[in-house]
């Protein structure tokens, strides 16, 4: 059975760590253009919707080929607003079987990346409610601590007699993955019922490769992204 999916690109105006992040210039194009281009290049979406509370961002999004049906209400666009709230707003009146969240902070996730994730998700069928991009952690939680007054305790509890994670080499620690902002895809059903979510109960992993999971979250990431974009002409080609 053919399944339909819509792309949702969240782009609120009030970024705190990197002001104006979603329209920040990257190799001559606003950051949001890369996610819109990748979504269109993938060829799997019925539409590419941008959810924003900003008329400026909406204009940029439309210029690069996205749909902005209505501005997001300010109550759904604060730094603490849950994702499920704006997703429910964006999905009103739509009948796709699934939705994908493509955050503008990941400019090097390509159309091929999105197709690979969608094919994996469809193949899982009813075994997963959603799929989420992850990568191996660089800072392992086994070496993290919680401060308690003058001392601290390990974040992760362990059984008595075991070698503490904080005194174990990284290669001997249990492999642990962390989510990145590359993509999330979920069946529409996770939005139904008294406790809607964007993930459901059964979340499958999508392992990103190379720069697919790179995210612009801090000012220092912007300079690195510029250097990387200069080495990736195919990323720019998708926008033209």
Image: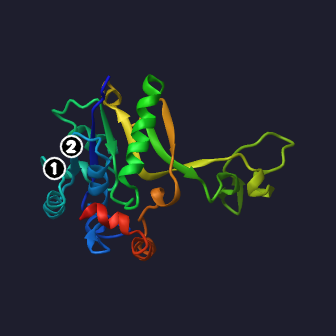
What residue sits 41% from the left and 65% below the top? 216
What residue sits 32% from the left and 74% below the top? 27
Which of disc 1 and disc 2 is earlier in sequence? 2
Q: Position of residue 47 (x, y in %)?
A: 21, 43
SS category of the residue bearing label 1: loop
User: Is the residue under label 1 in contact with that under label 2 (CB below 8 Å)?
Assistant: yes
Crowding at dot 2, Cα within 10 Å, few <14 / some 14-19 / many 20+, comes out as: some
Q: Position of residue 225 (x, y in %)?
A: 42, 71
SS category of the residue bearing label 2: loop
The residue most toward the right is 161
What residue sits 41% from the left and 73% below the top? 219
Q: Is residue 213 left or right of residue 193?
A: right
Residue topped by disc 2: 47
Crowding at dot 1, Cα within 10 Å, few <14 / some 14-19 / many 20+, comes out as: some
Which one is in front, 158 or 125? 125
Mark carried by residue 57:
none
Residue topped by disc 1: 67
Residue 14 seen in this snapshot:
no
Q: Quadrant of the C terminus?
A: bottom left
Q: Position of residue 158 (x, y in %)?
A: 76, 42
Whether 87 is drawn above or below 72: the answer is: above
Residue 30 seen in this snapshot:
yes
Q: Quadrant of the N terminus?
A: top left
Q: Is residue 208 left or right of residue 175?
A: left
Q: Quadrant of residue 184?
A: top left
């Amino acid at each position: 059975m053919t399944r339909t999916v819509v792309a949702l690109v969240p782009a609120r105006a009030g970024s705190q760590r990197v002001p104006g992040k979603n329209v920040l210039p990257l190799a001559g194009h606003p950051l949001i253009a890369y996610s819109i281009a990748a979504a269109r290049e993938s060829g799997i979406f019925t539409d590419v919707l941008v959810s924003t509370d900003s008329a400026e961002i909406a204009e940029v999004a439309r210029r690069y080929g996205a749909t902005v049906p209505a501005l997001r209400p300010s109550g759904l666009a604060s730094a603490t607003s849950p994702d499920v709230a704006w997703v429910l707003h964006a999905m009103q009146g739509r009948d796709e079987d699934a939705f994908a969240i493509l955050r503008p902070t990941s400019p090097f996730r390509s159309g091929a990346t999105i197709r690979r994730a969608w094919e994996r998700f469809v193949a899982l069928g009813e075994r997963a409610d959603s799929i989420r991009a992850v990568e191996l952690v660089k800072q392992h939680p086994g070496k993290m601590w919680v401060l308690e007054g003058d001392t601290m305790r390990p974040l992760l509890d362990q059984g008595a007699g075991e070698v503490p994670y904080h005194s174990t080499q990284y290669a001997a620690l249990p492999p642990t993955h962390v989510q990145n902002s590359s993509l999330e895809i979920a069946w529409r059903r996770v939005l139904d019922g008294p406790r809607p979510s964007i993930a459901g109960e059964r979340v499958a992993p999508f392992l990103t490769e190379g720069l697919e999971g790179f995210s612009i979250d801090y000012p220092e990431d912007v300079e690195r992204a510029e250097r990387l974009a200069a080495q990736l002409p195919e990323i720019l080609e998708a926008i033209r």
